[in-house]
Amino acid sequence: MAKPQEKVSFGERLKQIGQVFSFTAKQDRWFVPLLVAAVAIPVALTVLLVLLGAGWIYIPIGIMVTLLAAVIVLNLRSNAAMMNAAEGQPGAAASLVENMRGDWRVRPAASSTTQFDMVHIVIGKPGVILLAEGQPQRVRGLLGQEKKRLSKVIGNAPLYDYVIGNGEGELPIKKLRTTLMRMPRNLTGKDVNSLDKRLGALMARPQMPKGAIPKNMRPSKGAFRQQRPR
């Protein structure tokens, strides 16, 4: 089940805004000038209207417009800065989906290699979504293995897969959020819960390593004799 969101105090919220502001200012050289313009223009227009005799009612309106403009600039530029910083970072796709609004169940790096190739499993109302990050040729092999494994438990639930990247046929991480939000809602909340439980049971099963079993890990012949029925 999705975890309920914890309540954030006003002071903590201000601290988070300050962190976002600092991060965005370091990543985006146009952020501060755009923010200054978003604040200065409504303030200047408000002062001009009051001086021209339009009435004091425009002061609260001007304050609200100024705050709204500042929030819009902060939101747009901070999202762009985070996308630019996340691009090429291992696990960035899973982290982005985990922080999206809505009921998204994420299992980061359900399959991975030592070269930091990984496939994340996302469960949501569109169905099951596989997000692959890493070297395209290697991750496509991981995707095939994961599809085969999941096909045993997902039933008729839709299965989608994306390779995150900027090459041909790949999904840029900048478009991941909008792509997921525009996907059709094929499942109900009850279906998502049921699917999540089945996949949880599948992930909990230990997998035997491929290849020959080392001699020091093989059970002794005496152990087999003890297990034989008399």
Image (cartoon, rainbow, N blue to C red):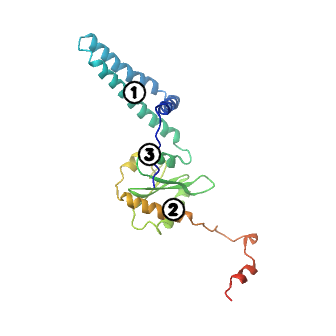
SS for callout 3? loop
Residue 115 is tagged as none
Identify the residue position indicated by label 1 in the image: 70
Residue 100 is tagged as 3
Q: Which comes sooner in the sequence, label 3 or label 1?
A: 1
CA gap between label 3 and label 1 equals 22 Å
Q: Which of the two residues, 180 or 204, is positioned nearer the viewer here?
A: 204
Q: Which comes sooner in the sequence, label 3 or label 2?
A: 3
**Residue 156 in picture, x, y percent from top left:** 39, 67
Name the amino acid type tagged 1: Ala
Identify the residue position indicated by label 2 in the image: 200
In this rendering, would 44 be left or right of 226? Answer: left
Q: Which comes sooner in the sequence, label 2 or label 1?
A: 1
On the rendered image, what quadrant is the C terminus found in? bottom right
Q: What crowding class fits label 1: few (fewer than 14 Cα within 10 Å), some (14-19), or many (20 or more)?
A: some
Q: Are marks 3 and 1 in contact (CB under 8 Å)?
A: no
Q: Are marks 2 and 1 in contact (CB under 8 Å)?
A: no
Name the amino acid type tagged 3: Met
Picture residue at 39% right of the left edge, 27% below the top: 70
In this rendering, would 125 be left or right of 173? Answer: left
CA gap between label 2 and label 1 equals 43 Å
Instruction: Single out the mark in the foreground, 2 or 1.
Output: 2
On the rendered image, what quadrant is the N terminus found in? bottom left
**Residue 199 in picture, x, y percent from top left:** 49, 63
Q: What crowding class fits label 2: few (fewer than 14 Cα within 10 Å), some (14-19), or many (20 or more)?
A: few
Q: In this view, does 219 lie above or below 162?
A: below
Q: Which of the two residues, 86 or 45, is positioned nearer the viewer here?
A: 45
**Residue 20 in picture, x, y percent from top left:** 49, 32
Name the amino acid type tagged 2: Gly
SS for callout 2? helix
Picture residue at 47% right of the left edge, 50% below the top: 3
